[in-house]
Image: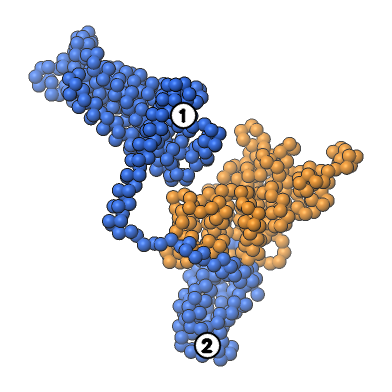
Chain colours: A blue, B orange
Amino acid sequence: MTSDRAATRAPGGKRSTAGLTFRRPEAHTLELVLSGDWTLDNELPFAEGVQTQVESNPGVRRLIFDPEALQAWDSGLLLFVIRVVDLCSSRGVDVVKDGLPIGARRLLSLAAAVPERKGARKDEKRPGFLAEVGDAALDLWRSMLEMLAFLGECVAALARLCRGKARFRASDLYTTMQTTGAQALPIVSLIALLVGVILAFVGAVQLKVFGAQIYVANLVGIAMVRVMGAVMTGVIMAGRTGAAFAAQLGTMQVSEEIDALQTLGLEPIDFLVLPRMLALFLMMPLLCLYADLMGVLGGFLVGVGLLDLGVVEYFNQTRASVKLNDLWIGLFHGAVFGVLIAVAGCLRGMQSGRSASAVGDATTSAVVTSIVSIVAATAIITVACNVLGI
Amino acid sequence: MARTGETTRSKITVDDLTMAYGSFVIQRDLSFTINERDIFIIMGGSGSGKSTLLRNMVGLVRPARGNVLYEEVNFWEADHEEQQRLMRRFGILYQGGALWSSLTLAENVALPLQEYTHLSARRIQELVSLKLSLVGLSGFEGYYPSEISGGMKKRAGLARAMALDPDILFFDEPSAGLDPLSARRLDDLILDLRDSLGATVVVVTHELESIFAIGDNSVFLDADAKTMIATGDPKQLRDHSANPKVRSFLTRGEWTAPATQGVDQERG
C-alpha cells in the first residue's frame, strides 16, 4: 500500500494518468478505486463523477477508498477527497477515509483540526458609491487635520530650537546638508543649464523676427533668477530629497526606530524632522543661486553661440535687466520650497504604515505633496509680489 | 512524484563548504549529509553563520568554496534552468514570515501556484483554502499581513512555503518571537507535515526545546572555531558529546566539564 507521498519525479520520469473506477463490494457501499498519479500536474477526475454515481445508486450509504494502485499523490488528492466529503455529506452518505494513505489522512485531519474562527472572514461586500465618496471625504478631512497638527508640532519644535531647547545631533544636520546640498549640484547643474538653453531658444525664435535677439538676455535672466531657478530646483529636490526623507522615516517607522526614540524621551520631531528641515531651508537658497547662474550660462551659450551676440554685450544686457529684487524674490522662493519639501517628506514618512507597500505609498505621497505645494506657493508668492508691486 | 522505499537515502549533501563575506571567512570545511525525511537541525550560537549556511543551501548566496548536492545534482554547478527547477522543490519559511505586504494571505499563497502551475483559478482558490486550513488560518484569506499577529504571519508563511507541495522544507528560526505554546504548536506542525508529506526538513534554530522535540539529526556550528564541531542526533550530543562546548550549549550551561576531563578534551 502507498503510505507516503514521495519525492518529486525526476525530469522526464514517467507519469501515469490518474484513474478512478467504482466497485460495489456491498449493497450499501461504494468503493472508489484510485490508480496512477494523483498529482496536481496531472489531469484529475472530478468529484462530481462520484456524486453522479451516488445519485444513480440510491442505496449507497457508505463510501470507501481503495488506493492499492495509487502510485503518487499530493494536494490534488486532498482537494478531491475534501470535495467528495462536501458533496456526500449533504446526501447522508458516510465517507470512510481509513483506506487512504496515512499521510493524506493526517493532512486531512490537520486541515479540519482548527475550525474557522467566527467572524474572522472579511465581509467581501463593496461599499456603495456614496459611501466611498463619504469615506474619501472623511479621509481627506482627517489628513488635513493631521497635516495641520504636524505643522503645529514643527513650529513648536522651531520655537524650542530658538530657545536652545531642541535636541538633535549636529552631525545629522551636517550630513543632511551635504546630501541635500553639495551632492545635488550635478543634477541641478544639468537641469538648470538645459532650462536656460530652452528658454533662450524659444525666446530667440520670436525675438529674431523683430531683430531683437539681444532681449534673449533679459528673458533668460529675469525668468531664471526670479522664479524658474527656484521652481526647477524645488522640483528636483522634491524628487530627490523629499522622497528620500519619506523613505528614511518610513523605514524607521517599520523597524520601530521612531518608537525607540520616543520611549527614550527624545522628540522624534526635534531629532529627525528639525535637522532635515533646517538643512533644506539653508541649502535651497544656495542651490537656487547656483541654478540661476547655470540657467544664465545656458542662455549665454545660445546667445553667443547661435545668435551672434557679443560676450560683453550679453553680460551687460543681463546685468542691466536683472534687478536685485528679482534675486531676493528667487531666493525667498527657494527657502520657502525648502521648508515645504522637508515638511511634506517628513510628514509622509512619520505617517507611514509599517509595511513595504506603506513606505512606497508614503514616498509617492511625499513627492506629490511637495510638487503641489511648490506650485501653489509659487502662485501665491507671484500674486503677492504683484500686489506689493515688487 | 514516485513512491519511496523504506531505506534511508541521502537527500542533501553539503560538501567541503566555505562561507565568506569577501575575505572574511564565516565558516569553513562544512561537510554533512541530510537523510530523506529527516528533520535536520542547524544549530550554534548567535553569529555562528547558521542563517548564512541556509542561504547558501537554498541558492540565495553562492558559497566561497564547496558544493551543495540535492540527491545527485550539484546546485552551484547546475545551469540556471536546473537551479530554478530545484528551487521550485523547496519550501522556505523565513524568520519573519516574509509575506508580501501588498498581497492578502490568499494572494500570497496563490502566487507560486499561479506562476508555476496551469491550474484553474477555482482549483487554486481551493488549494489556497486547503493550505491555510492546514496551518489553522481558515477564514483569514482576505487579510493583509499587517493585520495579523507575528505567529499568524509565520503560519501563513508556512502555508505559502507549502503551496507547491515541496519535498524539502527550510525553516529559519521558526520559533523565534513566538510564545511557548505557539512555538510548541509550530513544532508539532513541522512534525506532522514531515510525517504526512514525507518531506525532508532543515531547521535553523537555537531553541533547545524545539531542537530536542523535533530534531533527528543536527550539525553544530561554532563561531570561534569557524567550523562545525559536532554532528549527530541532538539528544545523543547532549548526553554524550565529547565536546564540552556542545554539551554546555545543549544543557543551557548546566553541564560543565570536570576540570581534569575538560583539560584532557581540549588537549585531545
Q: Earlier in the sequence, mark 2 or mark 1?
A: 2
Instruction: Identify the element where label 2 is drawn.
Output: loop
Question: What residue lies at 51% left-to-right and 83% top-to-bottom?
Answer: A92
Above/below status of A56 relative to A246: below
Q: Is residue A93 left or right of residue A229?
A: right
Which of the labelled discs sits on residue A120, or is there none? Answer: none
Residue closest to the eye, A85 or A216: A85
| Rendered-image quadrant of the C terminus of chain A | top left
Q: Choose top left, top right, bottom left or bottom right for residue B183.
A: bottom right
Q: Dot 2 corresponds to which residue?
A: A60
Question: Looking at the picture, how far across and down is residue B87, in whole percent?
Answer: 56, 52
Disc 2 sits on a residue from what chain? A
Residue closest to the eye, A82 or A39: A82
Q: Amino acid at mark 1?
A: Asp
Q: Residue furthest right?
A: B260
Q: Amino acid at mark 2?
A: Val
Which of the labelled discs sits on residue A270, or is there none? Answer: 1
Question: Looking at the picture, how far across and down is residue B232, in whole percent?
Answer: 76, 52
Q: Choose top left, top right, bottom left or bottom right for residue B185.
A: bottom right
Instruction: Identify the element where label 1 is drawn.
Output: helix
